[in-house]
Amino acid sequence: MTVTTDFLNQLNPSQRRAVEHFCGPLLVVAGAGSGKTRALTYRIANLILNNRVDPENILAVTFTNKAAREMKERVERLFAEQEALARHGKPLQALSEYEQIQLRSYVYKTFIKHLWIGTFHALCSRILRFDIEKYQSEAGHRWTKTFSIFDESDAQSLVKSIVVSKMNLDDRAFNPRSVRFAISNAKNQGYDAAEYEQANQTFKGRTIAEVYRYYQAGLAENNALDFDDLIRLPVQLFRQNSQVLNYWHRRFRHILVDEYQDTNRTQYDLLRLLTTNGQAGRFDDWENRSVFVVGDADQSIYSFRAADFTILMGFQNDFGDGLPDDDTRTLVKLEENYRSTSNILDVANYLIENNTERIDKILRATRGEGETIACYRADDEVAEAEYVVGQIRSLEFDHPELSWGDCAILYRANAQSRALEEVLTRYSIPYRVVGGLRFYDRREIKDVLAYLRLVANPADSVSLKRVINTPRRGIGKTTIDNLEKAAQELGVPLWEIISDETSAKTLAGRSGKAVVGFAKMVQSWQDKVDSATASEIVQDVLADTSYLETLQARGTEDDLERGQNIQELYNAVLQFEEENSEDASLLAFLANASLNSDLEDSKNEGNEVSLMTLHASKGLEFPVVFLVGLEQGLFPSNRSLDDAAAIEEERRLCYVGLTRAQDRLFISHARLRRLYGSDRTPAMPSIFLGELPPDYIQTNIATALPERWTKTQRQAKLSQTRQSSDRPGTHADDWTVGEPVSHPAFGEGKVTHIFGAGNKICLAIHFPGLGKKIIDPKVSTLERV
Ligand code: ATP
Ligand code: MG
């Protein structure tokens, strides 16, 4: 392939610096819509095209599977464009369809297929498919490479069986959901059961630690992992086995991470191990490798999953070499926003400035002023939905260039989609709920997947129990309980008892026969698993179980829809086989199904309005955005109301929402709202509404927004903040780690970390009772105590 740098012209100078930086660590920090993801994508292309890096040596981490797919497509396109110029001397679009297909298939096979791009979970599950058999946990548990991935409901049902059956605890005091949450949290902070117990020396803490132990044993017995273990196990394996780590360390010479502000401790440990090969201290191998991360601390919205944005701020300390010019060599800032009109951008920046825990950033608009932002107060949630739909319909009329697919409706809580869906349906506007009830969470889909998991991993007793009598085949609960007891006494998986004819025959007549028949059927699929494709096995499962016929025979509307969903699952298997010709095994498909948040994502998006939570909207952009439900207790959420740090996180979430909009932004709230089946209750406007600059906003109620600063006052305030960088206390040399300080709002605390250098610094300060906070001394005045 000819060397070319043409595509780099589509970047600004700072992006270009980031993209062309070859080896060593690099942090890109920048506000929303400044082209961070674009820089990361172009960097992959540049590494291969201009630096001649083998695609196998690249590992890119994205936040969703959808983002991973888009990134691959984008890189593929950049390649195909270059290749078209090199081979034919013409741009890609000027080639015949046949030539384009040929070219793209060449690019895919030679380059794209070998790239590892995906979420932490997907990438780790691939690593484990190679190496999990070399791992042994502290408690002696082992897994094989046919492991199942338990989703939240599988994990909770395992916790529940431990709480209720094994430990005879009251499941009101030890609610399986909250126990599972505690275990998950412990795992994400890197604690095993013993360490958790150490840190929680109460009756409750000790009991949860005990459940945690049984839970890990239960996972191992089922040859299953939960989502947290998918990342934790590779970290432990790498620490245990230097040969395994060495292999992956050599393999991934260039690591790229998008949305780095939402990394948690375990994910950080994984990156650190991979880049340093487990060596402490600075690295000497920077001529051959790079670690490139991009992020925006203002968009950190996953602290409930133990994400920690101080990891982003500590990047240069952790990966840089600490030399005085570190800042210029390991940091790139992007300061132009290409996404939104300046009105939208100003409003978003204005809001986020209310956070105290942040570093001030520059983000200049490159587009015109655009329309003002509309803010609507509705009577109730239905009227709010009607307002949104009304706006969509009038856009259709006034702006024929816009289509439904250009509109997104963003909300804080999943339950808000119902009212919106009803009104959209009433007006026949097509829509899709992104990441709502996940396709793979539907009952019928879980049933079929459980069959498939049992075929791939006979030790998976959770799946076995799910399908042994679905559809009904006369195997009662007592029979299953007896079989399970026998399995427990012998210490073998349930499947071994069931598939052993002599033991099954000891069961009473009808039940026994049914068990033997079931086992034979599953066995016949298992015999084929190495030779048949995933879709052939799905066909067999559907035919032999009469699952579809049973649904058809019942024939209600629900049943018919379930049947269609199963068809859709079959299509997904076919599509998967087409896209993953190198590994289209049943195992690979199951891993993909567990990790792909919803099937709709993988289908081509049609011309539909997108509905999604604010969390799901991260990284995306839409010409028209509706941000609904800005009410106290809903957004910011109830749980955050009396917690200053949680309110700041909600505000970041609002910033994420506002910055998704390219051209038009509509904000709304209701005076009365019915949610979660409650009666209609009065709702106060969100504090965030009061924090938006009134002269950017058109409302339907004159007094809807409290008076705040005007545009000129705001600009004056901004320049004041900028000037304050010369104040005493804003320079790195003004502070030392460990010294006590006082903050006007949080009181006294101790400096635990100084991020940055010169007069561009931030301090991490521990305030007793409040925890660690990040403070920019230019924004808040700190005093020595
Ligand atoms: P977020 O923080 O929301 O993830 P981001 O920083 O990753 O945003 P991108 O999604 O990469 O931003 O870019 C935002 C938009 O700006 C995209 O439509 C992208 O194509 C466009 N863009 C980025 N850089 C440039 C550029 N140099 N010239 C023109 N358009 C650009
Ligand atoms: Mg991005």
Image (spheres, helix red, strand yellow):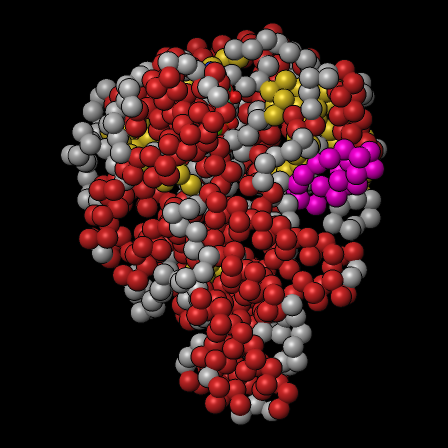
Residue at 32% over, 42% down: 271
Residue at image coords 41%, 81%: 491
Task: Judge by depth and name the residue closer to the eye, 95 or 346.
Answer: 95
Position of residue 411 measured from the top left corner of the image (x, y, whole percent): 66, 36
Give the magenta-colored segment's residue range: 412-433
| Residue 694 can be seen, yes or no | no
Does the stretch in magenta take in 414? yes
Of residue 88 and residue 496, the one placed in the foreground of this image is 88
Does residue 499 appear to the left or right of 191 in the view shown?
Answer: right
Rendered location of residue 544, percent (x, y): 59, 69
Tell me the residue at 63%/22% (across/down): 623
The answer to if 310 sits in the magenta stretch is: no
Q: In this rendering, is residue 274 above or below 468?
A: above
| Image quarter of the C terminus | top left
Across the whole image, how many numbered discs are drawn on residues?
0
Q: Position of residue 323 (x, y in %)?
A: 20, 24
Q: Where's residue 310, x and y in %?
A: 39, 36
User: What is the quadrant of the N terminus in the image?
Assistant: top left
Whether 436 is drawn above or below 509: the answer is above
Instruction: Judge left or right: residue 197 versus residue 272.
Output: right
Q: Is residue 575 above or below residue 341?
A: below
